[in-house]
Amino acid sequence: MEKEFVGICGVCEKNVYCHNGFLEGVVQEDHTLVCFSCHNEDKEDKSL
Ligand SMILES: [Zn+2]
C-alpha cells in the first residue's frame, strides 16, 4: 500500500495523501490543495 504525502488542505490544514495514485483531494485552479471533505462542503451542486 503506497501512501504519499502530497500537501496540506488549504481549508482545514489536514495532511492530504495520495494512495496508489489516487489523490485524497483536489488541486484547484490557483494550485491550492483541498481535501475531499472540504471540497464537497464547498460544492453546492449535489447531483453527484
Ligand atoms: Zn480539508
Image: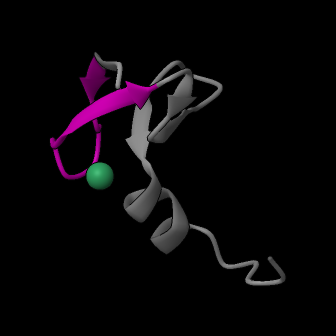
Answer above or below: position of 37 versus 12. Answer: below
Task: Tell me what residue is drawn at x 56 percent, y 31 percent.
Answer: 22
Residue at point 65% right, 25% down?
Answer: 29
| Residue 23 x/y as whole percent | 51, 32
Q: Nearer the viewer, residue 31 or 21?
A: 21
Please provide percent x and percent y for residue 9. Answer: 28, 38
Question: Vertically, is 24 above or below 23?
Answer: below
Placement of the C terminus among the 4 image quadrants: bottom right
Pick the residue in front: 47 or 28: 47
Residue 12 is one of the magenta-drawn residues: yes
15 falls in the magenta region: yes
Q: Give the number of marks.
A: 0
* Magenta extent: 6-19
Q: How is the image coloured?
A: one colour
Indicate the quadrant containing the N terminus: top left, top right, bottom left or bottom right. Answer: top left
Residue 47 placement: quadrant: bottom right
Tell which of 17 and 42 is nearer to you.
Answer: 17
Specify the farthest residue to the bottom.
46
- Where residue 38 appears, as percent x and y from the top left, is 39, 60
Q: Indicate left or right for 15 with 23 as reference.
A: left
- 48 sits to left or right of 32: right
Residue that protrudes farthest toward the right in the picture: 47
- Which residue is drawn at the image coordinates 76% and 78% (left, top)? 45
